[in-house]
């Protein structure tokens, strides 16, 4: 229903926060930002495709009744939040693997230079 909102907003907030951090971390955060924003956009397109989002108010077909706001907020927080956390864990795994590979490559180069 509206689960795409959480990763999309998180990605946009990350875009703003990225301006305040060190340049060395900025590239890694950009990867997370891209993952969140593109994931949110793809989810929004999928919701439009399946008719869950319409071009007229209330825009979300599940919100025909104002009392459905609690269902909407639960969807945004639980489903959207878990997707955002899963994306962040995936990103963290990618960054950790990148750092380990970088260390391994550097240590291999140092060993090669010392043995020559």
Image (tube, rainbow, N blue to C red):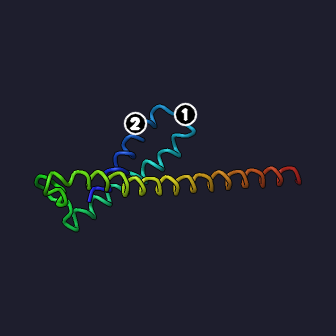
Q: Residue furthest top?
A: 20
- Tell me residue 14's x, y (percent): 42, 41
Which corner quadrant of the image does residue 74 belong to? bottom left
Residue at position x 32%, y 60% in the image = 42
Element at label 2: helix
The residues bearing labels 2 and 1 have C-alpha atoms spaced at a distance of: 13 Å
- Return the residue nearer the eye: 9 or 45: 9
- Return the residue nearer the eye: 54 or 32: 54
Instruction: Describe residue 10's horizontal placement relative to residue 32 as left or right.
Output: left
Crowd around label 1: few <14 · some 14–19 · many ≥20 (10 Å): few
Q: Residue furthest right?
A: 115
Crowd around label 2: few <14 · some 14–19 · many ≥20 (10 Å): few
Label ID, residue 88: none
Q: Give the number of marks.
A: 2
Q: Residue furthest bottom?
A: 50
Quadrant assignment for the N terminus: bottom left
Q: From the viewer's perspective, is residue 13 above or below residue 79?
A: above
Instruction: Describe residue 36's horizontal placement relative to residue 44 as left or right.
Output: right
Q: From the viewer's perspective, is residue 24 above or below residue 92?
A: above
Looking at the image, do the residues carrying marks 2 and 1 touch, with CB atoms under 8 Å apart? no
- Tell me residue 91's x, y (percent): 52, 54
Task: Identify the residue position indicated by label 1 in the image.
Answer: 22
Which corner quadrant of the image does residue 52 belong to? bottom left
Instruction: Describe residue 83's horizontal placement relative to residue 56 as left or right.
Output: right
- Tell me residue 18's x, y (percent): 46, 37
Residue at position x 57%, y 56% in the image = 94
Element at label 1: loop
Task: Identify the residue position indicated by label 2 in the image.
Answer: 16
- Return the residue nearer the eye: 103 or 89: 89
């Amino acid at each position: 229903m509206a689960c795409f909102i959480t990763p999309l907003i998180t990605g946009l907030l990350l875009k703003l926060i990225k301006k305040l951090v060190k340049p060395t971390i900025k590239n890694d955060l950009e990867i997370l930002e891209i993952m969140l924003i593109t994931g949110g956009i793809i989810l929004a397109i999928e919701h439009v495709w399946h008719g869950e989002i319409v071009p007229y108010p209330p825009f979300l077909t599940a919100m025909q009744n104002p009392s459905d706001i609690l269902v909407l907020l639960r969807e945004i927080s639980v489903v959207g939040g878990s997707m955002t956390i899963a994306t962040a864990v995936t990103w963290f795994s990618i960054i950790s693997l990148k750092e380990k590979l970088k260390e391994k490559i550097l240590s291999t180069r140092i060993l090669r230079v010392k043995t020559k």
